[in-house]
Each structure stands twice: as C-alpha cells, then as structure tokens.
Image (cartoon, grey):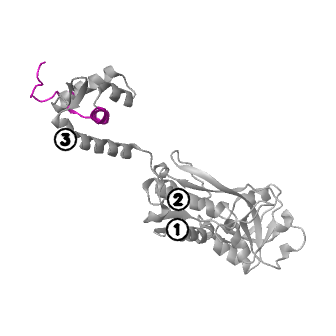
Amino acid sequence: MTPLSSSAAPASDSRLDANLAIALHALLTEQSVTRAAARLHTSPAAMSRTLARLRRVLQDPLLVRAGQRMVPTPRAQQLREETAEVVRRLGALLAPGAGVDPGALRTTFTVQAADLVCAALAPGMLRLAGQEAPGVSLRFRAEDLEAGPALRDGRIDLEVGSIDHVDPETRIEALATLRMAAAVRPGHPLAEGPLTPERLAAAEHVVVSRRGRFTGPLDTALAERGLHRRVAAVLPGHLAAMALAARSDVVCLVAAAPSGDAPSPLTDTATVLGLRLLDIPLPLPPLTIGMAWHPRHAADGGHRWLRDAVRRTLRTPGAAH
C-alpha cells in the first residue's frame, strides 16, 4: 500500500466543513464504514470516499484493518472526544431556538403607543412582568417617532395602536376592533333624549390629533348630510381630551367595545373618568388596534414574551386587573 504523503493536503481538501466533522464522528464512533454510512443515511461507497478525504486532510489513516474489523489509529483516538464535542456544538448551534425562560430575562423593552393605549397596557403588563419576568423593564414612548424606521433601526421594539404605516417588512397583528362613541359628562344635554346627527353637529367638540388637525371621519359623515360641527379645541392626546369632556360640555370621540362585547382595558378609561358613552347615529369606520414589530424579532424568545404579554393584556377582559 502506498504510504500517505507528508506534504500539505490540497487546498480543496484542507477546508473542513460541518459534514466532514459529522462524518468523522460517525466513523470514529462506529469504527465501521458500513455502520457509519447507515448512521448518516448514506451509502457505504459515499462514506468510503469521505473517509479517503478525511485521510488526505488529516494525513492519517484514522481507521485500519485488524482482521475482520477496523481499529482507530492513535491520532483517531486523540480526535474522538474533540470530534464528539464539535458535533455536539454544531447541533446546539443549528438547533431551533429553545423557548426562553421569562424569569431569566434581563432587558428593557421599548413600546411606542398613544397615551390611551399606554394607560391600557401599563397596569397589566407591569403585573405580568412582575409575576413572570421580574428582570424586564418597560419603557413606553409617546408617538413621537415615525414607527416604520424606528422599528427598523431598533429604537423601539414594538408599536401598539392604530397602525397607519405599511412597510413591506413590518409584521402587523390585529388585536382588537373597536367602534367610535361620543363621550360626554354626566348630565350633558346630549344625554337627554335620542342623539341625532343634527344634535351631535350642534354641540361643541374636542378633537384628538397629534398633527393639530381639526377634521376626521366624523366630519366626513356629517358633511354627507349637509352638517358641520364646531371644534372648540384640538388636543394631542386622548387622556387630555377625555379629561376636558369630563369637566365641560364638549363632546369627545372615544373608542368603545362593539355592542354586546365585554369591556376591555382599551375602553376602561372613559368609565374611570365617569364619562357617559353615546352611540353615534352615523356610519363611522371601526378602529383597529394592532401591534407592529420588525421581523428580526419574530423568533426571539424575549420578544415573543413581550408580544404575548400585550395580547393577554388587551385581548382578555380583566387581564390587567
């Protein structure tokens, strides 16, 4: 038999890959080309070619005949434990991500949401974090960033609210569909008798708009009937607008649960402030509350816990209590 050359192996053979490491582990464990081939679900001929390549790369016979069986060389015996560890590490590296233990998380999640959504989220999520992930801190940001780029750049981890941007890569999940209602203080004139489009238009209104806009879907619906409302004030946040409605005669549009549905944390604030909700006698589009995140977080265990905490807080009545 021609002895193995002591010269350097060809460049094409010197670049080890994961398959070679796995094949070497199988050969050293089984000490048989046939059994190693069966272990890796390949043919004995293919395994023989792999053994020949390993011999060229390592410049050692690795397995040699001893009667009816093959025995490892001293170099192969030295490599056995190291090869097994390499294969174990490869398996761990390439295995699907294991579920995260929320109790082991030590991180801060940044959630961007409107003030009313923050008021709905914060109590329930803080309670869930305290119970399940005490090492997690939550930073709530107002809607002061353009959410698409902020999600992409990692400045925020999650956006929750009415998602009005459509970025090709953004993942969006709907959480709740709400209707719009007119909120007034107890004893407000509109609370007496049936609410008609004319009476609604005649009242003074407060509008919520981060951009300072005076008009919205209600104005469009009123205009179709030749009606126009007076907007007395435009405020940047829902909580301030609802507080104003609770202390004056202005009307504030708020999100309410669909008729027949149980209240949710998203619709609790009006009740806490003592506001009375009136059905609007006009067809207004529903409000969909959802959450958006960048796909790089889709498989992350910690981010999955964050998204699930939002779901449990907003979707389940009483989850925040």
Q: Residue at x 9, y 28 (%)?
A: 7
Q: Where does label 2 land, which residue?
A: 305
Q: Secondary structure at mark 2?
A: helix
Q: Where does label 3 land, which residue?
A: 78
Please state the extent of the stretch shown in magenta in the rendering. 1-30
Mark 1 and mark 2: span between their CA atoms?
Answer: 16 Å
Q: Nearer the viewer, residue 113 or 69?
A: 69
Q: Secondary structure at mark 1?
A: strand
Which of disc 2 and disc 1 is earlier in sequence? 1
> What amino acid type is highlighted by mark number 3?
Gln
Q: Secondary structure at mark 3?
A: helix
* Relative image position of residue 197 (x, y in whole percent): 84, 63
Question: Which image quadrant for residue 257?
Answer: bottom right
> What amino acid type is highlighted by mark number 2?
Trp
Mark 3 and mark 2: span between their CA atoms?
Answer: 44 Å
| Viewer-nearest of discs 1 and 2 | 2
Image height of 160 relative to 193, above or below? above
Quadrant including the N terminus: top left
Q: Are marks 3 and 1 in contact (CB under 8 Å)?
A: no
Q: Where does label 1 land, which residue?
A: 140
Q: Residue at the far right: name it.
A: 193
Q: Nearer the viewer, residue 4 or 269?
A: 4
| Viewer-nearest of discs 3 and 1 | 3
